[in-house]
Image: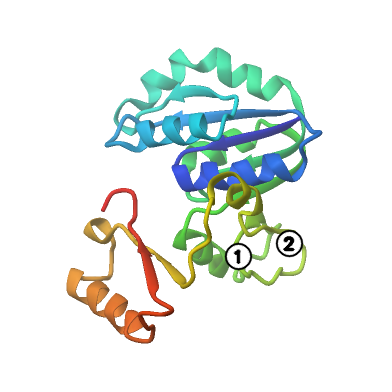
Amino acid sequence: MNLLIVESPLQLLCAYEAIKSNPEMPYRLLLRNNGRGSNDIHLYNCADSLQLNYQTFLLRPDYFKYDLLKKLPLMLDICRKEYNQVYLGSYYSSFLHALKRGLRREETYYLDDGAATLRAQLEQMKEVNKKINWFTFFNILPLQGQKIKRHSFESLKKTCIKEKKVGSYFIGQPVEIMSGYTKNQYYNGVSTIAHRFTEESPLLYIPHRIE
């Protein structure tokens, strides 16, 4: 059995690809809710629309210890079982890092978490200890001692795309909470890219879910 634990819709979409890449392997999918904004609702809707079997558990950052005590039986149950492969969400999740230490598994892979994946890979270049593995849609070159599984959302395309549109896609970013960029810098960057395209072959902008 494979174990997958996600905390955001993008991680869930990548988990879907991991599940479909080995359809004969049973899986256990857990959605970690954080009680903030619309993240939890988006997770539910995404998992339901993809017809995935899943469990949910609530760990709110402001009530972490309280929520963790309530879910302690679930955490112990997760750690008691053995898994072939474990797929985890954000590399920067302190909860997932702590939980990983108690998991019994053959291999661990981290799922994509947007630009944070690329930042984490840059940090891995400086890491002298064991490298983390990626299940990713990015074109990441593996470092020594690192495993990379690549996908291009093949299963998601088969499930969701009814008519292919001509053009290139730009996936929007949560500009309101991005650090290091102003709104104007972001808009100017998108505009600069968009001017390279034409009406016959346009740039198709997909808003970030919180835009």
Tag 2 residue: 146
Residue in the image at 57% along x and 35% along y: 5
Q: Quadrant of the N terminus?
A: top right
| Structural crowding at the residue carrying mark 1, measured as other residues with C-alpha within 10 Å and reported as few (<14), some (14–19) or many (≥20) | some
Residue 158: image location, x then y, percent: 63, 49
Residue 169 found in image quarter = bottom left
Tag 1 residue: 124
| Structural crowding at the residue carrying mark 2, measured as other residues with C-alpha within 10 Å and reported as few (<14), some (14–19) or many (≥20) | few
Count of picture labels: 2
Residue at the limit of the structure toward the bottom, as seen here:
196
Q: Amino acid at mark 2?
A: Gln
Residue in the image at 67% along x and 48% along y: 109
Callout 1: SS: helix
Residue 191: image location, x then y, percent: 27, 79
> In the displayed structure, does residue 65 sit left or right of residue 146?
left
- Whole-angstrom CA distance, mark 1 to mark 2, is 10 Å
Q: Are marks 1 and 2 in contact (CB under 8 Å)?
A: yes
The correct choice, above or below, for 25 with respect to 130 in the image is above
Residue 86: image location, x then y, percent: 69, 39
Residues 210 and 111: in front is 210
> In the displayed structure, does residue 76 sit left or right of residue 67?
right
Residue in the image at 62% along x and 65% along y: 127
The correct choice, above or below, for 188 with respect to 54 in the image is below
Q: Amino acid at mark 1?
A: Gln
Residue 54 found in image quarter = top right
